[in-house]
Image (tube, rainbow, N blue to C red):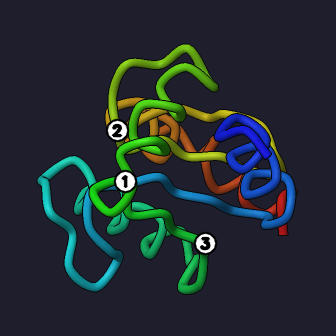
Amino acid sequence: MSIQDVIREQVTSHPVVLYMKGTPQFPQCGFSATATQILKACGVNEFYSVNVLENQEIREGIKQFANWPTIPQLYIKGQFVGGADIMRELFQSGELQKLLAAGS
């Protein structure tokens, strides 16, 4: 199984997936902390998270998977949503809450 297959399996097997640095309990960068806080503010207390610091292949592979150069990356129902800045904009507009409601 290629790393792209592993990532595809992760994003399609879980309704909400966050690729991040660290864990939701102990984020290892400010953007990952922000992404986690936004999801919690939307009422998403449980989501599948992947700590990219534990696997260099996933850390590089996820950037190619979505053609997005930075981490964190949020996926809802297999669809790439964006990073922390896009999550913040969608949250402030109410769009993220709608996407998450549709995804659960």
56 sits left or right of 28 in the view: right
User: Nearer the observer, disc 1 or disc 2?
Assistant: 1
What residue is pinned by disc 2? 71
Q: Are marks 3 and 1 in contact (CB under 8 Å)?
A: no
Instruction: State the separation of the CA atoms marked 2 and 3.
Output: 15 Å
SS at mark 3 in the image? strand
Amino acid carrying mark 1 in the image: Val
Amino acid residing under circle 2: Ile
Earlier-in-chain disc, 1 versus 2? 1
Residue plotted at (72% across, 59% down): 100
Q: What SS does tag 2 mark?
A: loop
Instruction: Identify the element where label 1 is drawn.
Output: helix
Side of 80 relative to 52 (left or right) = right
- Which residue is identified by label 3? 48
Q: Amino acid at mark 3?
A: Tyr
Name the residue beneath numbered marker 1: 52
